[in-house]
Image (cartoon, rainbow, N blue to C red):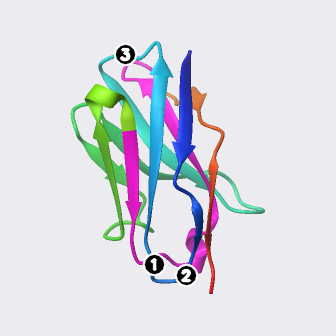
Amino acid sequence: QVRLVESGGGLVQPGGSLRLSCAASGTIFSVNVMGWYRQAPGKQRELVATITSGGSTNYADSVKGRFTISRENAKNTVFLQMHSLKSEDTAVYYCCYRAATRPNFNDWGQGTQVTVSS
């Protein structure tokens, strides 16, 4: 079992920036994938970005060039730097974790609200 705790959400104006953090604890495999998903009201949860323990990244087309995912393996922490935020980025952002051998993310954080509004 892995516990994930997100922080860094909040209210920001369009065009602004935010940085989300997620700290993982518990039984963590050294070879793993961590990531961020988001869910807007009335919509399904969708992928934002993922990063492997080796540093390989994957982004949703909607955030490419604006968001950057990174991690500190020694601290089991993953970050999501968000720039040029738009109203459509408003959502609850969830951190997730899986061992590299697992096909699906099976550990999730509680979520942090990001609201982009003037």
Residue drawn at (59%, 33%) of the image: 108
Mark 3 vs mark 2, CA separation in Å: 38 Å
Foreground residue, 28 or 88? Answer: 28
Q: Is residue 5 magenta?
A: no
Q: Position of residue 65 (x, y in %)?
A: 31, 70
Residue indicated by mark 1? 16
Kindly report which numbered mark, 1 or 3, lies closer to the viewer in this rendering.
1
The residue under label 3 is which amino acid type? Phe
Q: Secondary structure at mark 3?
A: loop
Residue drawn at (52%, 78%) of the image: 86
Asked whether disc 2 touches disc 1, contact meaning CB atoms under 8 Å apart, the reply is: yes
Residue indicated by mark 3? 29
Q: Residues within 10 Å of mark 3 (few under 14, many from 20)?
A: some
Quarter containing the C terminus: bottom right
The residue under label 1 is which amino acid type? Gly
- Span shown in magenta: 78-102
Residue drawn at (57%, 26%) of the image: 106
Residue indicated by mark 2? 13
Q: Secondary structure at mark 1?
A: loop
Q: Earlier in the sequence, mark 1 or mark 3?
A: 1
Residue drawn at (57%, 58%) of the image: 9
Quarter containing the N terminus: top right
Q: Position of residue 58 (x, y in %)?
A: 33, 50
The residue under label 2 is which amino acid type? Gln
